[in-house]
Image (cartoon, rainbow, N blue to C red):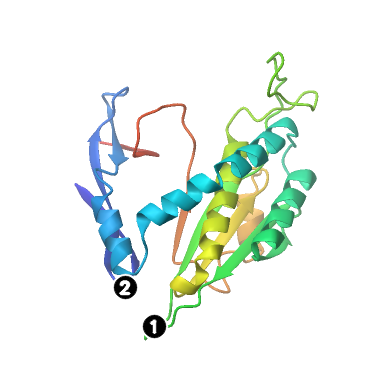
Amino acid sequence: EIYTLSLHDALPIYELRLRPHPDRPDRSELFLPTQTRVEKALSGKGWNMSSILDDARGHRDRIISVRREINENPEPGFAEEKTASLVERLLDEFGVEHTRTAGTGVVGIIRGGAKTRRKGRCVGLRADMDALPIQDARQGGLRSRVDGFMHACGHDVHTACLLGAAKLLSDRRAGFPGSVKLLFQPAEETDTGGARPMIEAGVLENPRIDVLFGLHEVRRSEERRVGKECRS
């Protein structure tokens, strides 16, 4: 099966395929077979994938530093004040307008400047920010400075990745129509969750999000793996 995801006027940018899961014979996984189609689609819109990747590598050390700062200062759900403030400070630096929502949630929006005959779409990118109530047993080096809490599920990575994407997209806003919404969600690990309060606050509207992406980091080195499984 082939799943084609279109973001630009029926232009297929990502072509996802199913293959057997390497660790779970009862499951399949989605994967990106090649970058060629992505590069072709982007270059057709005046975007150069190589320059984007080079730019991303140029911001690598900064984003790693941000991730480590978040990792060392974990906060529980609906109490992510330092994390939300860090997100807001960097969005200000990147020239991205933003608002608070659902207490410690942050919503940024990058408005594209390219003009097209059709109304531009709105793409949402989401990352969670909260930590888990787990004692960090690591000794020395990078570890939590907050007793009883640590980033054991990668939310520090997710937040840093979304901030990196915010920088790259903000620098290129003149080259795309529509807009990109950045959703920094609190309290993913709680019983009540932070998604519903954000939705009830209207984060999916004004402008309405047409397609929404999230990711989850995995400790694997294989490239082009999509962190999403589906039953075969």
Residue at (70%, 20%) from the top-left corner? 136
Residue 4 in view, yes or no: no
Residue holding disc 1: 116
Q: Residues within 10 Å of mark 1 (few under 14, many from 20)?
A: few
Q: Residues within 10 Å of mark 2 (few under 14, many from 20)?
A: few
Relative placement, left or right, of 203 versus 104 is: left
At which x and y percent is residue 156? 63, 38
Residue holding disc 2: 9
Do tag 1 and tag 2 residues touch (Cβ < 8 Å)?
Answer: yes
Quadrant of the rendering where the C terminus is positioned: top left
Does 56 appear above or below 20? below
At which x and y percent is residue 164? 56, 50
Residue 131, image quadrant: top right
| Residue at disc 1, secondary structure | loop
In the depicted view, which residue is nearer to us: 147 or 165?
A: 165
Residue 134, image quadrant: top right
At which x and y percent is residue 142? 68, 24
Residue 171, image quadrant: bottom right
Kind of residue at disc 2 = Asp
In the depicted view, which residue is nearer to us: 143 or 99?
A: 143
Relative placement, left or right, of 148 versus 170 is: right
